[in-house]
Amino acid sequence: MPQRNVVTWTAMITSNNSRNNHMRAWSVFPQMLRDGVKALSCGQLVHSLAIKIGVQGSSVYVDNSLMDMYATCCDSMDRARMVFDDITTKTDVCWTTLITGYTHRGDAYGGLRVFRQMFLEEGALSLFSFSIAARACASIGSGILGKQVHAEVVKHGFESNLPVMNSILDMYCKCHCESEAKRLFSVMTHKDTITWNTLIAGFEALDSRESLCIFSRMVSEVLYCGQQLHGVIVRSGLDNYLEISNALIYMYAKCGNIADSRKIFSKMPCTNLVSWTSMINGYGDHGYGKDAVELFNEMIRSGIMIRILQGGSFDTGYEGLDDATSGEGR
């Protein structure tokens, strides 16, 4: 059938179940989940089948699927909690599924109560559960509870996990804990674009000037890394490779260092359309419209466009020329 709905799936399960073909009925369940069907009536039928064949409470996949279904389809978490309580051996996935169910329904306090219970019962820990707990604290603006979650992260040695620390950083920003956010950011040994963007967005709502300073610092650090890489390239004798030079032009332009982009471009023994357009777009992106137009005209005079047309193809990089050369120059 090209299209299957909850009625179709229920009919399949009921038909097999009525003929006492329980295992065949059960095999329909994962297919139904893959199709994204989570209707409550069908889910209850599957739950009763799970009890009948003895897999509820002993199969991680079944239990987590049932909890997720009840958390999604019901008006409360009572049934999801009932499934959880019947689980014999609760894995980290079980705890995380229940915590996620509460928080996704907007019940941050419920999720945090389960998070606390997980520690009291010495349950299996999941890195993802810490991230979910941090988001729950952020959603209710509780920096106090957030600090407790952070303390548990440190206690269990998870402070080197970047996704978890990004969640803690986001929590501090959303809870208006500026000093804690700055302190955490300064001690983080690893940072990615999510880390920087989280801090910039967080401070944008609190202090736009501070947000700009953080952005400037990010660009400076990226530029410094690019300059170190450039040094390695030169020392390795790779700076005459066309593709590498093009990448350096692009990198310096994106970091706002147009002078170094132009310096590399001017020293290139040979260029292609990517070289020209990277430099032209660099000028255009930073408001140097006049320089972009002059370089565009220079590119036309160089004859590169004629050679490309004669070759029957355009190199990538032509996109964006209209935008770069149509603006007002400085």
Image (cartoon, rainbow, N blue to C red):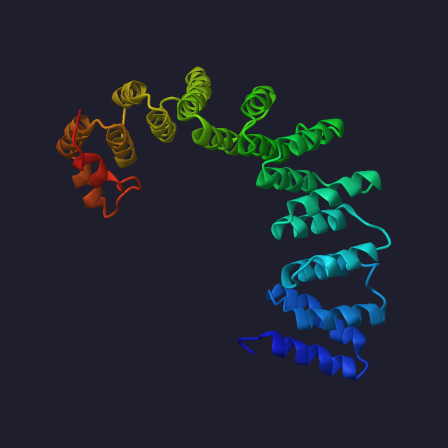
* Residue 176 visible in the displayed image: yes
Q: Quadrant of the N terminus?
A: bottom right
Residue found 15% across the figure and 34% down from its top: 300
* Residue 124 visible in the displayed image: no
Q: Quadrant of residue 187?
A: top right
User: Total number of numbered labels?
Assistant: 0
Up/down of 89 relative to 278, above or below: below
Is residue 20 shown left or right of residue 312?
right
Up/down of 112 relative to 279, above or below: below
Residue found 62% across the figure and 53% down from its top: 105
Query: x, y (%) of residue 256?
Result: 33, 23
Up/down of 126 relative to 78, above or below: above
Query: x, y (%) of residue 237?
Result: 42, 19
Q: Quadrant of the C terminus?
A: top left
Is residue 283 shown left or right of residue 230?
left
> Which of 71 and 89 lies nearest the eye of the viewer?
71
Residue found 62% across the figure and 78% down from its top: 7
Query: x, y (%) of residue 8?
Result: 62, 78
Is residue 74 shown left or right of residue 58?
left
Q: Quadrant of residue 47?
A: bottom right
Query: x, y (%) of residue 313?
Result: 26, 47
Up/down of 126 relative to 60, above or below: above
Residue found 43% across the figure and 22% down from its top: 210
> Which of 48 and 147 lies nearest the eye of the viewer?
147
> Which of 306 and 218 lies nearest the eye of the viewer?
218
Q: Quadrant of residue 278?
A: top left
> Which of 146 and 233 lies nearest the eye of the viewer?
146
